[in-house]
Image (tube, helix red, strand yellow):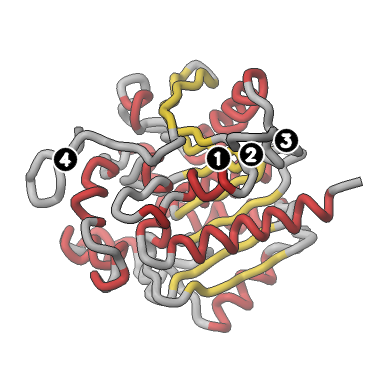
Amino acid sequence: MSASRTGRTAPPPTHSAGVRPLLLEAAGLTLSGLLAEPAEAPPRATVVAVHGGGMRAGYFDGQAHPDLSLLTLGARLGFTVLALDRPGYGHSAAQAPDGLTLEEQAAVLTAALDAFAQGHTVGQGFALLAHSFGGMVALATVARTPGLLALDASGVGHRYGVEHDERQRLRRRMEWERSWGPLGLYPPGTFRAAEHLVAPIPPREAAEVPRWPEHFDDLAPRIDLPLRLTFAEHEAWWLHEDQDLADLAACFTKAPVLQIERQPDAAHNISLGRAARGYHLRALAFFEQCLQAAAP
């Protein structure tokens, strides 16, 4: 179990109805995760949810309110949803205690998609939905993995709103406030329910964070699939004024579809806030549009 920032022991993890844990062997690691599948028909496609730094796969199955869970919503709308603990989190933390680099994680995620497809019906293919550092991993993955349907990412941009040296000086409380924003954005019980989601950021992953602008400049021109990026109204980690977003959009020269949106009444951790359902519905609608465009 994780310890909360207050020092209390986190409660045992629980999952929404229809969500089950699974283990997946990929690239020499055993990845833990959560899975939800449509009850009455094969999936239209499979959404793979990739969590951010310091969180776990349960970020996409928020327990404070039934409307928060991407997994149950996606399954009800005909998608299989697979949320994986990235390398260095969950079950694989013992195998890779220092974590992996960005490119190493992308290679593992590609292998995980292949492994999952060998044992499950995936529908028309895989779409990625990612958050924060998971968005970095997802961008690196789609740049190296042909045939993916689309990527929807929140809480990841191209230029930080706070310099790395300043981030290093921030107190933990200030870091927490940047990620969570105003407390009123979350339903009651969110922070107690989320305590078991918190995990240490592995050191090799943490070392990649200040290098992201350089990674981004290499990756963005290689992205050639439909892409949607969302910035929360109260996003504090990334520059996202109008000119910043225009500069960001200009980097994706090969993306056939590019949508950059703002999510009102939300902070960095969108999928645990009151706005989660609205954000998830928009992401799934984007995937639905991509499926229709790809249909013969």
Judging by the rendered image, the residue that carries numbered circle 1 is: 81
Percent x, y for residue 51?
43, 45
Secondary element type, mark 3: loop
Secondary element type, mark 4: loop
Judging by the rendered image, the residue that carries numbered circle 4 is: 10
Q: Residues within 10 Å of mark 2 (few under 14, many from 20)?
A: many
Amino acid under disc 4: Ala
Q: Residue at x 25, y 56 (%)?
A: 190
Foreground: 203 or 288?
288
User: Image quadrant of residue 108?
Assistant: top right
Farthest-out residue, left: 7
| Circle 2/circle 1 CB separation < 8 Å | yes
Farthest-out residue, bottom: 242
Amino acid under disc 3: Gly
Amino acid under disc 1: Val
Asked if residue 167 is positioned above or below residue 193 in the image, the reply reads: below
Judging by the rendered image, the residue that carries numbered circle 2 is: 46
Q: Earlier in the sequence, mark 3 or mark 4?
A: 4
Judging by the rendered image, the residue that carries numbered circle 3 is: 123
| Left or right: where 286 falls relative to 214 | right
Q: Earlier in the sequence, mark 3 or mark 2?
A: 2
Q: Residue at x 52, y 50 (%)?
A: 73
User: Image quadrant of residue 86?
Assistant: top left
